[in-house]
């Protein structure tokens, strides 16, 4: 496979300027008037790589650029006003102001994947990456199906290698000579030298990746339907959960005896025992106190928007998986994320406009981000301790701020 790369050099840096101080009679410190339109990086010390750079010319160019962010004086929030606006369904319409000017530029690029890139994972040492791409595989555009749905890249050797193993036999009626019909690779996770990949070919494959030249598939986990989501335990890499119409937990410690456990649901009373969901999210806990817990989300089959589904929480015991009851567990779940240091996790779900009006959270609310905490009696239902209303119809991903030890700041990436 041909590959191309391009490198871009960093732009010239800016040297600092010095402010002149004056002597005053008053003992109070003198405060200069704040220039809200000044470039925020004029007085920042940056080591220059080009000593002959014309600093004044560079500063003029940067300061006159309308695209650069500028510092603004932070306004003190009126808490009562914000709470009252939230009750009325309003939001905070103050613009977000960036505080860092980025000089990042594209470094390397490759082309030729089977379709849109869906997932990407980095190796722990940061020198290699894997990318999974979509593949056209339905009967209407099967002739456009092509390879390169799973790629392995190496920055040190500047190489991109195809891993052509996620495919099914092509129907005999096809006019294409290639007997392989490549399927989308939609999920992956890299732990140590092991790469886990999930695909619509109904398999999860585990790779031993020592280098781009030396890699092999050690396990293939066969499923009855397409694998939609996957999560590998960080504390026990031989334990992984996969989601199709149900959720399975696999134990791959013994390659000769691969075992799987079907997780039970704390179903809503209106669902029959044989009712089939579709898995939407899976996540193992990230801390020693939550490593035994697996959170999973499912959705009812149907056309968008889908409001009903199931939110499940399980605890791994020595001989079985214990179902933990949840509050707000009958909703469709877009995504689940655990906090990096606290026993809490966040979920994103759509909100029915009718329910939003009944709750009084505003007619503009289309989805809800909830935070659940395990710091309560698990014999009762795990409660939602925080809820954030969101105007987006679809939430692709939620995340916690890694620097926030209180778990207060949550982001939602939306469509």
Image (tube, grey):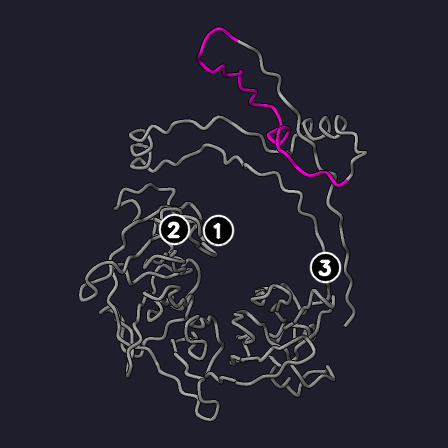
- Is 85 a magenta residue? no
| In-image side of 170 versus 262 (left or right) | right
Disc 3 marks which residue? 109
Picture residue at 73% right of the left edge, 29% below the top: 61
Judge by depth and name the residue closer to the eye, 165 or 234. 234
> Which quarter of the figure has residue 190?
bottom right
**Which of the two discs, 3 and 2, sits closer to the camera?**
3
- The residue furthest top is 25
Residue depicted at 49% across the width and 14% down the height? 30
Residue of label 1: 414
Q: In which quarter of the image is residue 200?
A: bottom right
Asked whether disc 3 touches disc 1, contact meaning CB atoms under 8 Å apart, the reply is no
The mark that comes first in sequence, 3 or 2, is: 3
**On the picture, is 346 further left or further right than 221?**
left
What is the distance, in whole Å, between disc 3 and disc 2 at their CAs? 36 Å
339 relative position to 99: left or right: left
Task: Give the residue at mark 2.
Answer: 367
Residue 188: in sight, yes or no? no
Q: Are circles 2 and 1 on residues that touch, CB within 8 Å?
A: yes
Q: Is mark 3 on a helix, strand or loop?
A: loop
**Residue range of the region highlighted in magenta in the rendering:** 24-49
The answer to which image quadrant residue 215 occupies is: bottom right
Residue 242, horizontal then vertical, whole percent: 43, 75
Structural distance between the alpha carbons of marks 3 and 1: 26 Å
Dot 3 surroundings within 10 Å: few (below 14), some, or many (20 or more)?
Answer: few
Give percent across and percent down for residue 395.
Answer: 45, 54
Q: Which of the pair 115/251 is nearer the observer?
A: 251
């Amino acid at each position: 496979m041909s590959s191309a790369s391009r490198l871009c050099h960093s732009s010239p840096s800016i040297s600092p300027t010095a402010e002149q101080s004056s002597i005053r009679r008053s003992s109070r410190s003198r405060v200069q008037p704040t220039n809200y339109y000044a470039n925020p990086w004029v007085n920042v010390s940056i080591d220059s790589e080009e000593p002959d750079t014309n600093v004044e010319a560079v500063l003029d160019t940067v300061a006159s650029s309308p695209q650069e962010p500028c510092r603004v004086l932070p306004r003190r929030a009126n808490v009562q006003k914000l709470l009252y606006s939230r009750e009325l369904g309003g939001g905070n319409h103050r613009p977000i102001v960036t505080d860092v000017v980025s000089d990042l530029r594209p470094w390397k690029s490759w082309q030729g994947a089977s379709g849109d890139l869906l997932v990407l994972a980095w190796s722990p040492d940061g020198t290699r990456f894997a990318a999974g791409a979509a593949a056209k595989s339905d009967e209407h555009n099967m002739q456009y199906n092509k390879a390169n749905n799973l790629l392995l890249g190496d920055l040190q050797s500047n190489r991109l290698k195809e891993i052509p193993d996620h495919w099914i036999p092509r129907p005999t009626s096809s006019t294409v000579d290639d007997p392989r019909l490549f399927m989308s690779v939609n999920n992956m996770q890299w732990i140590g030298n092991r790469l886990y990949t999930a695909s619509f070919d109904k398999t999860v494959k585990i790779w031993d990746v020592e280098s781009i030249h030396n890699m092999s598939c050690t396990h293939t986990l066969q499923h009855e339907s397409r694998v939609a989501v996957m999560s590998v335990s960080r504390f026990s890499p031989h334990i992984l959960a996969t989601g199709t119409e149900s959720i399975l937990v696999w134990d791959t410690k013994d390659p000769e005896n691969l075992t799987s456990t079907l997780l039970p649901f704390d179903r809503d009373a209106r669902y029959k025992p044989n009712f089939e969901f579709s898995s939407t999210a899976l996540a193992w806990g990230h801390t020693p106190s939550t490593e035994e817990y697996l959170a999973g989300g499912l959705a009812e089959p149907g056309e968008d928007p889908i409001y009903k589904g199931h939110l499940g929480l399980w605890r791994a015991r020595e001989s079985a998986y214990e179902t933990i009851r949840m509050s707000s567990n009958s909703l469709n779940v877009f995504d689940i994320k655990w906090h990096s240091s606290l026993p809490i996790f966040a979920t994103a779900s759509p909100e029915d406009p009718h329910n939003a009006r009944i709750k009084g959270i505003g007619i503009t609310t289309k989805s809800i981000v909830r935070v659940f905490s395990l710091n309560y009696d698990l014999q009762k239902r795990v409660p939602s301790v925080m809820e954030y209303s969101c105007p987006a119809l679809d939430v692709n991903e939620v995340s916690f701020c890694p620097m926030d030890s209180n778990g207060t700041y949550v982001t939602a990436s939306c469509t």
